[in-house]
Image: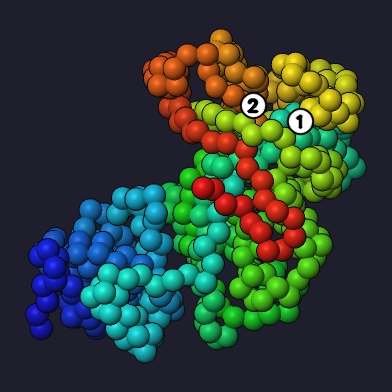
Amino acid sequence: MQARAGRGGSLIVPAIVLLSVTLVVLCPHTATSAAAAAPSSVLRSALCSNPSKWVGFGQQVSVPHGRLEHRRLLGPLLQRRQHCNNARGSSLRNMGPWTVRGVEALSKSVDLASAAASTGESLKWDVEAFSPSKINLFLRIVGKRPDGFHDLGSLFQAISLGDTLKINKLGLEDEDTFECDMEGVPTDDSNLVVRAANLFRERAGVKGGLHMCLEKKVPAQGGLGGGSANAATTLWALNKIFDYPATQEQLVEWSAELGSDITFFLSSGTAYCSGRGEVLESVPQLPQRSVYIIKPEKGLSTPLVFKNLNYDALCKEDPRDILRRFYTDSGSNDKEKYINDLELPAFTLMPELQEIKDSLSKFSFEAVLMSGSGTSIFAIGEPGVAKDAFLQEIRTAGTKWGLEVFEAQFINRGEGLGDWYEVN
């Protein structure tokens, strides 16, 4: 069998893929060796020219820099019909494993791959949804509850730093597949995307396998609610895919079963949250603001931060009074309304957070505050110097902390089922 040359010298290699996967069925280790021995340009063409349709068979395979590396033979063969077509251009080493179940599914996928490669098209997803993150403009811890959680009062604001969730509905008998391009993110039932999908089908009474692909950009352990947003986005997306079997009120009710912050992302993007974070109150949208997110490489466990909370040192101001100041201040730059009761325990556990905040505070931002339980620090507005100079200074000063800097803005969405968060 021969590979066929396409435009620009690229190789379209359904035949080689079929040969490789056939060998896996007969002898996994031989197949891996054969694939690894193939010309790297051939393999790279097969994987990169249309990564959303390339199909492996029978074993997990990683794809570092255009070669195939055998990891382990799977027991039951799983089906992965598509792969994330990462819009942010992640490298091959982040693509994750490729598997497929069944010869019939394999033949269909390879036919689709060949057709798509020859036309330059890619298979469409049933839903591609933006999954935002959030910052806490203020966070007051009111007290500890009998169930071990804490009552809080907080003004949440959605921001444009976010992930992308792609979902395709499969057949009734198909198993779920879920993949993520961020190293260390679990892809089993512990992931909130998988849990949300299972909960939705159970509560809505719908059936069908799902292929779900999550492209991550929101850093973990940042106090930005990335995982919670992923869960809320899953509920919204599946409601759309299954033709809206649930009301907005039901989605909100179900979201509270999954976690504290998830309900917020089903709001319009600005909300006062109380209880343990699941009780939402709609509030007017705030004026558009730019925001910089500064995240050190190190993270903190939320339970650990709460464990170190000193209740005697908490702010005494009623959270509703703080909320009122966000809507009654006329033109005044009231930085004292930006309060986070979790800063003190987080800064005690990780003193460099105080240094990072102090470094940002010397610029002319409207406010500088830690978000949630950390470890992200956000700065609202623009620095008093040229943006490039600010970014360079922060990155240079934060080399020892492994800082990431993200630029974002406040975002909101329409009320109800139809609208979702979008970033222009």
Q: Residue furthest front?
A: 330
- The residue that label 2 is drawn on is 370
Q: Is label 2 in a helix, a strand or a loop?
A: strand
| Residue visible at 54% across and 36% down in the picture | 408
**Which numbered disc flags the more N-terminal residue, 1 or 2?**
1
| Residue visible at 64% across and 76% down in the picture | 242
Three-letter amino acid code at the position of disc 1: Leu
Give the CA distance from mark 1 to mark 2: 10 Å
Q: Kindly indicate the quadrant of the structure image that contains residue 84.
A: bottom left
**Would you call the spot at circle 2 few (<14 residues within 10 Å), some (14-19), or many (20 or more)?**
many
Q: Residue furthest top?
A: 362
Q: Position of residue 386 (x, y in %)?
A: 44, 17
Q: Residue furthest bottom?
A: 104
**Residue 298 seen in the current view:** no
Q: Position of residue 330 (x, y in %)?
A: 79, 20
In-image side of 71 versus 294 (left or right): left
Q: Kindly indicate the quadrant of the structure image that contains residue 364.
A: top right
Q: Nearer the viewer, residue 378 or 291?
A: 291
In-image side of 12 versus 294 (left or right): left
Q: Position of residue 51 (x, y in %)?
A: 32, 65
Q: Is residue 309 above or below residue 199?
A: above
**Would you call the spot at circle 1 few (<14 residues within 10 Å), some (14-19), or many (20 or more)?**
many
Three-letter amino acid code at the position of disc 2: Met
| Residue visible at 57% across and 30% down in the picture | 291
- The residue that label 1 is drawn on is 139
**Residue 360 seen in the current view:** yes
> Total number of numbered labels?
2
Q: Is residue 194 above or below residue 225?
A: below
Point out the image quarter for the N terminus: bottom left
Q: Position of residue 175 (x, y in %)?
A: 53, 78
| Residue visible at 61% across and 40% down in the picture | 159
